Amino acid sequence: MSPFLSHMDLALAEARAAAARGEVPVGAVLIAPDGSIAARAGNRSRELSDPTAHAEILVIREACARLKTERLPGFDLWVSLEPCPMCAAALSNARIRRLYYGAGDPKSGGIAQGPRIFSHAQCHHRPEVYDGQQAGAAARLLSEFFARRRD
Amino acid sequence: MSPFLSHMDLALAEARAAAARGEVPVGAVLIAPDGSIAARAGNRSRELSDPTAHAEILVIREACARLKTERLPGFDLWVSLEPCPMCAAALSNARIRRLYYGAGDPKSGGIAQGPRIFSHAQCHHRPEVYDGQQAGAAARLLSEFFARRRD
């Protein structure tokens, strides 16, 4: 294993921080075309009373606001869990270049299952998708979180 | 025709105001369970540099922030155009009760076509859907807007 933190390590750290705040543990990191970290976030929908405040949406909003743009061509997004349909469609709207995600999400995922957001003529931009990035770590985080909530 | 403004008339007025700001002309009105207007908005994605700032998302965020909640059960949303997949999934996440929309959107719609957001096991709440509300007026607004943009 590399001694350096990968982009997915950072996304997982954001997911753990979200869990510590009582949010669903999902974290995302947005990488600019020059390789720098444009934004990082975990879910904050409870804290912000905002059902759209998923990690992916938060990093897109932050980068777009800073760059005063609606589109982020050349930007890559790393996220610990397969995005839901809302986030998948937002990634498309924002023209994200590549999407790397950890665990698949049979319950709520919108890319490899269910509505398969990128697989329709109504989708006008399809990021390249790389799934299964450190999938075990992301899946463990989620299952531990939901097991604790059931206690 | 009634001498009073309907919810869809208000949504169309928001769509016209959006067009006047150079935004895609879509407007939305959110009605609280007691029948009062909880929020109204038109698209502001250009103005806010936010690809998620569609009319539907703006009214949901405004009402949730004011009520300090992530969910709006019993709320109904009126919108001039068929929601895109991002907005359709956000309506589901927010537990909106009924969705009334104007024109269908073969190009970018996410409800009656393409990913059909409410038609999968990964969708955990399905609003009741009433389409075709003053559809002609909403469709005219859009076609006039895009005709002007092509000039």
Image (spheres, coloured by chain):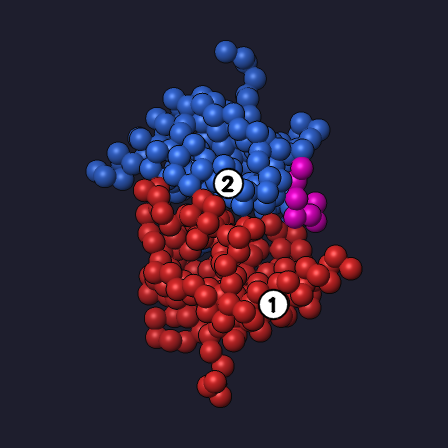
Chain colours: A red, B blue
Residue A70 visible, this angle: no
Find residue A101 and report its horizontal and vertical position in percent: 46, 64
* Magenta stretch, main secondary structure class: loop
Q: Chain of mark 2?
A: B
Give the residue at the far left of this rendering: B151
Q: Residue at x 50, y 40 (%)?
A: B120
SS for callout 1: helix
**Tag 2: amino acid:** His
| In this picture, residue B90 sits left or right of residue A150 | left
* Residue receiving disc 1: A140
Q: CA distance from mark 2 to mark 1?
A: 25 Å
Q: Residue at x 70, y 49 (%)?
A: B68
Start-end of magenta stretch: B67-73
Q: Quadrant of residue A77?
A: bottom left
* Residue receiving disc 2: B120
Find residue A88 and report its horizontal and vertical position in percent: 45, 53
Mark 2, Cα crowd under 10 Å, few <14 / some 14-19 / many 20+, is some
Camera-nearest residue between A83 and B15:
A83
SS for callout 2: loop
User: As displayed, is residue A1 above or below residue B21?
Assistant: below
Find residue B96 and report its horizontal and vertical position in percent: 61, 37
Q: Quadrant of residue B18?
A: top left
